[in-house]
Image (cartoon, rainbow, N blue to C red):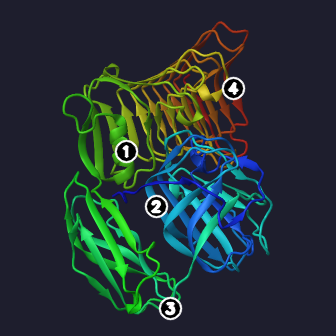
Amino acid sequence: MLISMSVSSVEAQTPSYYYNSATGGNYIPFGMHISTSWQKWQGHYGPGAFTGAFPGNITKVYFMRAANTGGTTYQNFGVYIGQSSSNTVSTSSWYTPVTQALYASSFTVPSGNNGTWFEIPLTTPVYYNPNQMLIIQVCASGIIGGTGFPMRDGGPAPGTPAPNVGRLYGGGSGCATTAPSGSTTNYHANFGFDIAPATPDNAGISELLSPVAFCAGTEDIKVKLVNLGTNTLNNVTIDWTFNGVPQPTINWTTPLASFADATVTLGTKTFTAGTPYTLVAWTSSPNGQQDTFTANDTLTATLQPSLSGTFTIGGASPDYATFADAVNDLNAYGVCGPVVFNVRSGAYNENIGLQNVVGTSAINTITFQSESGNRADVQVTHGASNTGDNFVLSFGGATFVTFRNMTMTSTSTSYARVVDMGSSTDCTVESCDLIAPTVGTTSNYCAVVYGYGSNNHRSTINNCNVRNGSYGIYFGGSSNTNTQDYCVVTNNEITNSYYTAYYSYYQGFETFADNVINLGPGYSYMYLTFFYYGHDASIERNQWFGSGRNYAYGIYFYYQNYYVPGNTRFVNN
């Protein structure tokens, strides 16, 4: 399912009401290309932080650039607003509840200069009480155009009383990220808004509730009705169209308190696989009165069944011409059953950026594989130019995805990652050639396979040829007690790594078995493999070969089973 909105921000004048004390810059969240753990941000502003603001509906929000920027387009972009009578926010969970004020499948922030505001118009204005703490949340699943930018940030705590936490941030699953991974106490972004006075009688359709991530067939269509007026909503008219055809009017007569919401079932429709459907629903005549504020009346959505079954990529008459086309549908519509993409033989000059695909599970898996079964027949090549596109394949926040029987090549000597695990779990690369250029750096920007800090549990690299780069495979968890667990690296041949073939950091219960490692000239200190701060590893039947350097370590263990007690097997190597 996709709520199909393509929205653009505009270059803005100064907002009507604003906080403008920050002088620093920070890439969270608008620079989420640097890290998938920056996809969701929540800022907190105390009562009185916005001089002159009065009770009313916030119609636009504003942020300030901290650098000269080009245009940037975000995928699955959302803005949420909440309020609290308390100034206390937990550092381990997002503040809730927050109201969805904007959702767009793509949202573009235009180019602009350092120190200038940009505005984000809200599709659902949200009521603001200046005597309460304001919570503003911005999130997206990734960047699909441009390179991201920093916003002006780092100001002192505003409001009386000031909130105890300035910001929360996290990522991996875009707006669906369940818990923050970081927080900062006195660190506030320059932020502002415009207000329209609250009216006595005002209603709107704010959200599509169902169907979401659904298979082809018959589904109920449900939306959220919101009373945005100061009076109790005793009655309102709801009209809707489906693919442009008017549908029966609904006369709502159940009392709804001010700023409360209710679920309304519009009707039932049949959906065909691969076919988009347009829904428009709107309110009128709240309490029999003219609605004088219509900006929040209408919801427009495009619905399409999720994917299930077997599809082709490339070649003659494919289902999808490119990987990007297939991934866009996965990210937009999700899956409702197992999905297989058979990739036709050929050269694909692109990089592949997955996100958190709705509907995946141990049963509803996604597989990309060479149709011929020969890894040499599918060649995926990309030359990254910065940290934001430093991957041939990025799993993002995906789960239960496998790539099999293809060759992936990075051509950049500065940003040479071939596979970036992102914040994924349960993902596999199998029977692939993963090739980076020969480099002369120890930077992990040139690791052939990279996954660090996000706990990519149950990741598997099996039966692959891993060539060149600074590191062959660079895997690591969050900390020495919060480890990345049950990863499997087996049956691989890892050659010509400049620094080390396998770098394992903060991992628990990993399996490293039946691999062949062969390193020649490179960094003066040869480390064939690192095992740092891990526990309960199984290291069996591997072969190590090294030559041509000044100093050499074969297998380097450091504090293994120390912070988390356990037993590591090192057998038959």
Residue visible at 39% across and 55% down? 358
| Sequence-earlier tag: 4 or 3 | 3
Classify the position of the C terminus by image quarter.
Answer: top right
**Residue type indicated by callout 1:** Asn
The residue identified by callout 4 is 556
Residue 213 located left or right of residue 22: left
- Of badges 2 and 3, nearer the viewer stands 3
**Cα distance in 3D space between marks 4 and 1:** 42 Å
Crowd band around label 3 with a 10 angstrom C-alpha radius: few (<14), some (14–19), many (20+) = some
Q: Mark 1 vs mark 3: give the one in front.
A: 3
Sooner in the amino-acid sequence: mark 1 or mark 3: 3
Q: In the image shown, does 110 or 168 lie closer to the viewer?
A: 110
Amino acid type, residue under disc 4 in the picture: Tyr
| Amino acid marked by disc 3 | Asn
Residue 349 position, x and y percent, is 39, 26
- Camera-nearest residue between 420 and 33: 33
Residue 170 image point, x, y percent = 61, 54
The answer to which of marks 2 and 1 sits earlier in the sequence is 2
* SS at circle 1: helix
Q: CA distance from mark 4 to mark 3?
A: 70 Å
Q: Is residue 156 above or below residue 350?
A: below
C-alpha gap between disc 1 and disc 3: 43 Å
Residue where numbered disc 3 is placed: 231
Which residue in the structure is indicated by mark 1? 328
